[in-house]
Image: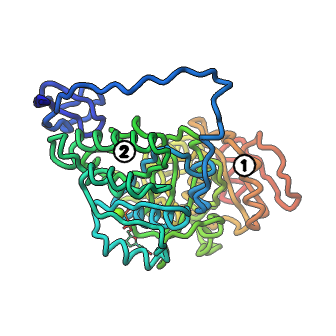
Amino acid sequence: MAKSRIEHVCGDCGATHTKWAGQCSSCGQWNTLVEEVAVASAPTIPAAGPASRIGDVDPLTSRPRATCIGELDRVLGGGLVAGSVTLLGGEPGIGKSTLLLQLLAAFGGTALYVTAEESAQQVRLRAERLDAVRPDLWLLAETALPHILASIDDTKPDIVVIDSVQTVHDPALGSPPGSVVQVRGCAQQLVNRAKQRGVPVVLVGHVTKEGSLAGPRVLEHLVDTVLSFEGERHHALRLLRATKHRFGPTNELGLFEMVGHGLEGVPDPSELFLGDRRTGIPGSAVAPTIDGQRPLLVEVQALTTPAPPNVPARRTTQGIDSNRLALLLAVLQQRARIPTSQTDVYASTVGGVRLAEPGLDLAACLAIVSAMNDRPLPADMAVFGEVGLGGEIRQVAHTPRRLAEAARLGFRRVIGPRSAPDPDDAHLHLLRAATLPEALAAAGLT
Ligand code: TYD
Ligand code: MG
């Protein structure tokens, strides 16, 4: 008979401690330790397999199979690999269930959707909306792991989705559903089954802003791929990235738009971001940015007002890192003599994109100065470059791709770093600026 004992498990990193403490000594987070019942069972050692020469291993068995959802295949580097386990994390309501139902409908073959949160009727209703009602799509509304594993063995699917791993529980583990011991234990058994059967399994994991019930971080080392699905709830745009991927690169970005009949891929994001742009307005600058491998033209907007006397100036950002904005304002003040310290600054990217990209620095600076001087930038001008603490404009990666994207969307002038190579497009004029004052002059702001 298995013996149980009490242990304290960190809800964030999954480290176990014998005593409770305010701070997890493993990851340094505060107030994340929870008491759990650990079942000490005899370890089971799987039968040993023979070692093989590396040249004899068949690489074809881990070739990905396309999911037929273009943006998902882009992020996965081709598709899903047999026997692989993918964790799809994201805040509730972002569209994880929608994406996966669309995946099951598109993948082909027998698919099993295990819904441990919603009823089968709810899933059926959503599937109708997504046009995903297929004869070989099987639904199981179940939370108990042994029944789920039995159903995988019965149905013999070509792909399995578990929605979500936090609501699945194994009665043999003792702890309450949603606890770290349960989530980790259930995920491990699902991983084993995926490898045994050679079937790709996708697990949904909820992440909340405060850190989830049992943070998907405890699962990261168990699975092959971790995808994160992000976006602003009030915007239709959704961004998909791989933060861990055993079968390909992790720097690809997938873009979707949530519409009335599910998620639609966005093959041309720049067009979407600049769709509602009004030209000739002060406080706006367009930057050719790169996210992963993808060029995105993004509009940065700024609004400035004089700060009331004796009150610290306000700085509000959306889509831009607030520390980065503070740094850029200090550089503008010290290196370009722009009086930002007594100015309230509101800066945002348009369309709900969150970007942490140095190439955006110059656009943010020019948008702020344009707002302060009440002078617009020319409508056909885009700007990019990292701004250094000395006020110098620095080179950023993938310059040719940025220039090509700006030219494609009809921009005729680009301000960039001094060392930027000539653009391929003869219609695009590159204005090189070594310093912030030179860039301000090139934009007609001084
Ligand atoms: P859902 O996939 O349930 O999110 P998650 O599984 O991540 O919690 O999707 C939630 C939102 O998406 C919901 O608020 C409604 C919206 N939605 C659409 O706008 N169009 C659609 O076709 C569907 C199915 C959902
Ligand atoms: Mg859901």
Q: Is residue 151 visible?
A: yes
* Label 1 CA crowd tier, 10 Å (few <14, some 14–19, many 20+): many
Query: Residue at horizontal 40%, vertical 25%?
Result: 47
Query: Residue at horizontal 16%, vertical 38%?
Result: 34
Task: Classify residue 71 by image quadrant.
Answer: bottom right
Element type at mark 1: strand
Q: Which mark, residue 190?
A: 2
Q: Quadrant of ligand 1?
A: bottom left
Q: Which residue is mark 1?
A: 416
Work out which quarter of the rendered image holds the N terminus and state it: top left
The figure's colour scheme reads rainbow
Task: Tell whether 130 sits left or right of 37.
Answer: right
Q: Amino acid at mark 2?
A: Leu
Task: Nearest to the eye among marks 1 and 2: give it.
Answer: 2
Q: Nearer the viewer, residue 158 or 320?
A: 158
Q: Position of residue 68 (x, y in %)?
A: 60, 62
Q: Position of residue 347 (x, y in %)?
A: 48, 59
Q: Position of residue 168 (x, y in %)?
A: 26, 52
Task: Classify residue 91 by image quadrant.
Answer: bottom left
Task: Tell whether 17 sits left or right of 150.
Answer: left
Outermost residue toward the front in this view: 154
Mark 1 or mark 2: whose residue is earlier in sequence: 2
Q: Nearer the viewer, residue 348 or 424?
A: 424
Is label 2's Cβ within 8 Å of ligand 2?
no
Residue 278 higher or lower than 314, as above or below: below
Q: Amino acid at mark 1?
A: Gly
Query: Residue at horizontal 43%, vertical 40%?
Result: 223
Task: Tell whether 425 sits left or right of 198.
Answer: right
Query: Residue at horizontal 78%, vertical 52%?
Result: 431
Task: Tell whether 187 sits left or right of 112.
Answer: left
Q: Is residue 310 visible?
A: no
